[in-house]
């Protein structure tokens, strides 16, 4: 069974990171941390929830709290895992613990690409200063974390993962986040559109249209995904039977649970459990990169990124 991987943060800081090479990294999750994975050299595969994504040098990917994920690769690489502790920011964004982000390099609009480049800059700035021996004040770390989170909220909310972020009203996004939070907190119970509409003081047909316009394409898919997401945790952290897990996650019908799970994870719950048990039986192969190599590597990487993004005239390339 898998366990939570605890992240060590400098005293008072909401930011932490590690730089390493990986061939086979164990299946794990974080209960209070958002993880940004930046590939500096080579490539790495990330298995995260229902998605497998290959990152190559210069690409960045987000892991939501508490997504179950693991990394593996068939070639040499250098990876940065950058962590943001979320609990200090719940008072600012009450729904933050339930917001899903889709921060990945595929099919980005120019606006999203620019936002993602800024996130990368903030990550690199923090890491480079630290490995260079500078001590980042807690207030500076908080400022960097706030900017990264604001960029993620503004441009990479899963609501418009397959759409253009600038075309959506912020009020709509906040409403979507509240709906997701409501479903996350009540997924074990029967939930209807009428329940959500009453909670939002809106017509249920409006709520239905709002969710149909999201990346989920409808209420039943939203709720099905949330329930399957919780089922994944039980499949990998307990020895409960498939039938028990189905009931614990709010599915009234076992066949419907299988259908929903296969729709998102492309396999049955039992196949998913067996596949991860086999992966866990393989030895871990990864190593931290030493500080001397890290500083040189980061300096060269930052210089190369600047050369790519800036034209000879000194203007940012689109």
Image: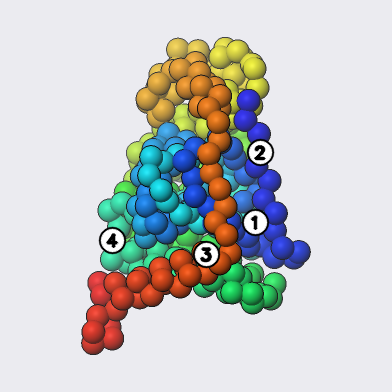
Judging by the rendered image, the residue that carries numbered circle 3 is: 294
| On screen, residue 73 above or below 106 | above
Judging by the rendered image, the residue that carries numbered circle 2 is: 4
Judging by the rendered image, the residue that carries numbered circle 1 is: 85
CB within 8 Å, label 3 to label 1: no
How far apart in space, not on screen, are marks 2 and 1 (Cα)? 14 Å
Mark 1 or 4: in front is 1
Q: Position of residue 295 (x, y in %)?
A: 52, 69
Side of 101 relative to 98 (left or right): left
Identity of the residue drawn at 64% across and 69% down: 142
Q: Residues within 10 Å of mark 1 (few under 14, many from 20)?
A: many
SS at badge 2? strand
Identity of the residue drawn at 63% across and 60% down: 16
| On screen, residue 147 above or below 84 | below
Side of 149 relative to 212 (left or right): right
Identity of the residue drawn at 25% across and 72% down: 318
Mark 2 or 1: in front is 2
Q: Position of residue 2 (x, y in %)?
A: 62, 30
Between 24 and 106, the one lying in front of the other is 24
Judging by the rendered image, the residue that carries numbered circle 4 is: 109
How far apart in space, not on screen, are marks 4 and 2 (Cα)? 34 Å
Which mark sits nearer the N-terminus, 2 or 3? 2
How far apart in space, not on screen, are marks 4 and 3 (Cα)? 31 Å
Quadrant of res 108: bottom left
Residue 189 in sight: no
How far apart in space, not on screen, are marks 3 and 1 (Cα)? 23 Å
How far apart in space, not on screen, are marks 1 and 4 (Cα)? 28 Å
Q: Position of residue 73 (x, y in %)?
A: 41, 41
């Amino acid at each position: 069974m898998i366990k939570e991987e605890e992240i060590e943060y400098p005293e008072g800081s909401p930011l932490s990171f590690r730089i390493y090479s990986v061939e086979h990294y164990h299946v794990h999750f974080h209960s209070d941390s958002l993880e940004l994975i930046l590939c500096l050299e080579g490539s790495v595969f990330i298995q995260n929830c229902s998605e497998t994504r290959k990152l190559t040098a210069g690409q960045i990917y987000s892991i939501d709290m508490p997504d179950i994920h693991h990394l593996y690769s068939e070639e040499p690489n250098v990876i940065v895992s950058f962590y943001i502790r979320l609990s200090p920011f719940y008072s600012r964004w009450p729904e933050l613990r339930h917001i899903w982000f889709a921060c990945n390099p595929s099919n980005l609009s120019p606006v999203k690409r620019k936002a993602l480049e800024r996130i990368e800059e903030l990550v690199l700035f923090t890491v480079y200063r630290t490995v260079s021996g500078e001590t980042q004040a807690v207030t500076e770390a908080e400022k960097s974390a706030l900017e990264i989170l604001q960029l993620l909220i503004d441009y990479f909310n899963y609501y418009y993962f397959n759409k253009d972020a600038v075309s959506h009203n912020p009020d709509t996004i906040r409403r979507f986040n509240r709906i997701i939070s409501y479903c996350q907190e009540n997924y074990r119970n029967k939930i209807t559109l009428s329940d959500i509409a009453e909670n939002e003081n809106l017509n249920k047909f409006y709520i239905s249209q709002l969710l149909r316009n999201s990346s989920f394409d409808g209420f039943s898919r939203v709720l099905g995904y949330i329930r399957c997401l919780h089922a994944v945790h039980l499949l990998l952290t307990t020895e409960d039977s498939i039938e028990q897990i189905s009931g614990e996650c709010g599915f009234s019908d076992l066949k419907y649970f299988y259908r929903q799970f296969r729709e998102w994870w492309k396999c049955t719950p039992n196949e998913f459990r067996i596949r991860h048990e086999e992966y866990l039986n393989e030895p871990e192969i990864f190593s931290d990169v030493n500080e001397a190599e890290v500083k040189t590597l980061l300096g060269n990487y930052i210089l190369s990124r600047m050369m790519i993004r800036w034209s000879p005239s000194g203007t940012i390339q689109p």
